[in-house]
Amino acid sequence: MDEINDEDLLLALLNSAPVVDGTRTDTLDGPGGAELVARFDGTGSPAESTRLRQMRGALQGAIRDQDDALGALDALLEDATLIPEVTTEGIHWNLQVPPDQRIAVRAALAWAAVVDGLPGRLRPCANSECNLFLIDRSRPGTAKWCSMATCGNRMKARTHAHRRRTS
């Protein structure tokens, strides 16, 4: 499994429910979902879309420390098995899972790898009006926003305006 590619999958899935003009949307519907499924070799079936939505909710809940998110993840991973294949280059892990669940399980495995390899670096955007997530790869680990150009600038402008009003 390609870990970097799967980090891309993880963020694409987590960020597939952005807030647009104050309303949460679902980009798994329509062209955005079709692109995600094609990019990560999915089946494109309705069952796969359902599983992706369930996994997105469970992963978002786990990242936000919501009650029972880990139980939901456990249930969604029930049919998944990793089978080791020993080669001269080391161990290669083969994912055994029904085709409609493959992308969702890969996203969960990527989540586990990020949580293990970059503890505390996968987080929701600090803008409470945003529903996006980021993997903080900055040296000090202080990134707060999904995008400095959008949420970062908005939040800094709000803070500045608030300071001007109160002074």
Image (spheres, helix red, strand yellow):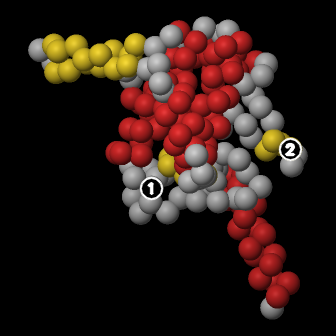
Is residue 8 visible to us here? no
Residue 153 located left or right of residue 120: right
Density class for disc 1 (Cα within 10 Å; few <14, some 14-19, many ≥20) is few
- Where, by quadrant of the figure, is residue 17 drawn? top right
- Where, by quadrant of the figure, is residue 51 drawn? top right
Q: What x and y, as percent, mark residue 4?
A: 42, 30
> Which one is nearer the viewer's eye here, 27 or 50?
50
Residue type beneath disc 1 = Gly
Residue type beneath disc 2 = Thr
Q: Find residue 57 and name its label.
A: none
- Residue drawn where x is 71% and y is 47% of the image: 131
Is residue 48 visible to us here? yes
Secondary structure of the residue carrying numbered label 2: strand
Direction left: furthest residue: 88
> Which one is nearer the viewer's eye here, 34 or 59?
59
- Where, by quadrant of the figure, is residue 76 drawn? top right
Q: Can you say whether 54 is above or below 63 in the image?
A: above
- Residue drawn where x is 60% and y is 51% of the image: 67
Q: Which residue is mark 2?
A: 23
- Residue drawn where x is 46% and y is 14% of the image: 97
Density class for disc 2 (Cα within 10 Å; few <14, some 14-19, many ≥20) is few
Tag 1 and tag 2, C-beta contact below 8 Å? no
Q: Which residue is mark 1?
A: 120
Residue 42 located left or right of residue 78: right
User: The C terminus appears in which quarter of the rendering?
Assistant: bottom right
> Sequence-wise, which precedes: disc 1 or disc 2?
2
Q: Can you say whether 15 is above or below 126 in the image?
A: above
> Which one is nearer the viewer's eye here, 167 or 1?
1
Secondary structure of the residue carrying numbered label 1: loop
Q: What x and y, as percent, mark residue 101?
A: 55, 17
